[in-house]
Image (spheres, rainbow, N blue to C red):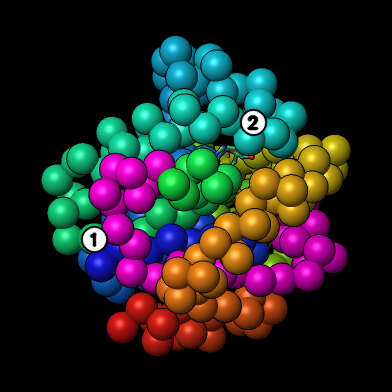
Amino acid sequence: MNFIFLGPPGAGKGTIAKYVSREESIPQISTGDLLRASVKAETEIGQRAKNYMDEGKLVPDELVIDLLKTRIKKGDCAGGFILDGFPRTIPQAKALIEAEIFIDKVLNFKASEKILIQRLSGRRTCKNCSAIFHITNIPPKKEGICDKCGEDLFQRDDDQPEAIKKRLNVYKQQTFPLIDFYEKEEILADIDTEKPISEIVEDALSVIK
Ligand code: AP5
């Protein structure tokens, strides 16, 4: 089965997707992670995407759609997948339909703006295994070090106050309309994320199963 994790920046899509991915044995495909890997590898897509990402803007549709389609062709997606952060615009959602990539459920992760800002400004990510922590909500055992692989944690460039503000506005203008789009398809389920992670995982799994 194929799923979309939709929601504003900081709602916890990536955090919950990692648990569901393990539980269901299906890959988590984060377009944010794919783009950050392309920037790091200095590929053509990465070079074109970097400024948009640093400023908190969306990367142009055609770049992300190509990146996503290439990833979905890989063998590990044959048994299903979680799209984390894609689609983010109506043209991206339509591109899935045109490519005959069918979605079974869309999980709509919800949280107040105050919570989103608190989560994003304290997020730390492992530079090696991409595990996600938070300086107060989900702190690593040793400050600045990943519990899972022992590598350093870093703060994302787009988790600075100006970029956070921009990303939240971009979400409202360009991504929020997808809620209506998927409601009309009758595949949308709301997930309240203002509770402990174990409970959110349970809620997400009950929608998926
Ligand atoms: P991307 O990497 O996708 O970022 P995002 O959507 O802005 O989402 P985040 O990763 O910020 O939030 P999340 O919901 O995954 O939260 P997380 O689990 O980390 O995209 C980055 C950029 O790439 C975009 O701005 C854009 O430029 C570009 N891009 C990507 N996809 C694109 C697309 N399709 N089209 C165009 N451009 C695209 O959690 C956040 C924090 O909260 C963490 O610290 C976590 O530990 C903590 N936390 C999570 N859940 C809880 C909880 N229940 N309680 C307490 N703390 C919690």
**Where residue 39 sits: x, y (%)?**
50, 23
The reply to whether the magenta stretch includes residue 69 is: no
Q: Looking at numbered disc 1 in the image, what kind of residue is underneath it?
A: Gly
Report the disc number at residue 80. Answer: 1
> How far apart are labels 2 and 1 at the CA level?
28 Å
Relative horizontal placement of residue 89, taking residue 119 as reference (left or right): left
Cβ at disc 2 under 8 Å from ligand 1: yes
Task: State the residue at coordinates (56%, 28%).
Answer: 60
Q: Looking at numbered disc 2 in the image, what kind of residue is underneath it?
A: Met
**Where residue 34 sits: x, y (%)?**
43, 36
**Dot 2, crowdedness within 10 Å: few (<14), some or many (≥20)?**
many
Cβ at disc 1 under 8 Å from ligand 1: no
- The magenta-colored residue range is 95-123
Report which residue position mark 2 lands on: 53
- Could you tell me if residue 141 is visible in this image? no
**Dot 1, crowdedness within 10 Å: few (<14), some or many (≥20)?**
some
Task: State the residue at coordinates (60%, 65%).
Answer: 180
The reply to whether the magenta stretch includes residue 119 is: yes
Q: Which residue occupies the foreground of this view, 113 or 65?
A: 65
- Quarter where residue 170 is shown: top right
**Residue 40 sits above or below residue 113 on the image:** above
Q: Are marks 2 and 1 in contact (CB under 8 Å)?
A: no
Relative horizontal placement of residue 175, taking residue 39 as reference (left or right): right
**Residue 57 sits above or below residue 192 on the image:** above
